[in-house]
Amino acid sequence: MNPRIAAIVAGIVTLALGLGGLFYPERVMGLLGFTVAIGASPAAVLGEVRATYGGLFVVMGALTVTAAFDPAGARGRLFVLGLLWLGA
């Protein structure tokens, strides 16, 4: 597969997952098997889900899509994005 197409597809999928986490945090929590613990603030939990599974993934997806225009020149950026995936 062409590296440019692979980076674009990975970026779009990551961006879509991030937008899902940003706008539908309850569904993401359900997919991951998470619930709000007793005594925890639901607003704080949803904010954390939005930040972790929404904001981080939106930025990762956007950077991957922009790196797809020149994969050879953005090798370092794609490497760091891969490390972010491993960390996530």
Image (tube, helix red, strand yellow):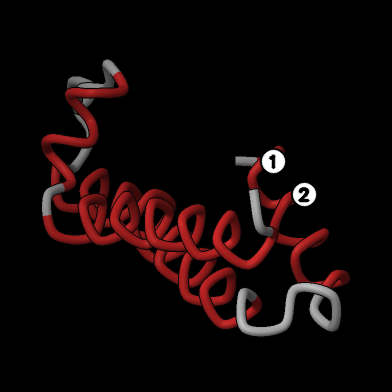
Q: Position of residue 29 (x, y in %)?
A: 23, 31
Nearest to viewer (mark 2 / mark 1) = 2
Mark 2 vs mark 1, CA separation in Å: 6 Å
Question: Dot 1 corresponds to which residue?
Answer: 87
Q: Is residue 40 above or below residue 6?
A: above
Question: Element type at marker 1?
Answer: helix
Q: Position of residue 14 (x, y in %)?
A: 43, 54
Q: Is residue 65 left or right of residue 75?
A: left
Amino acid type at circle 1 is Gly
Question: Element type at marker 2?
Answer: helix
Q: Position of residue 55 (x, y in %)?
A: 39, 66
The residue shown at (69%, 60%) is 3
Q: Is residue 76 left or right of residue 1?
A: right
Question: Dot 2 corresponds to which residue?
Answer: 83
Q: Is residue 62 above or below residue 84?
A: below
Q: Are marks 2 and 1 in contact (CB under 8 Å)?
A: yes
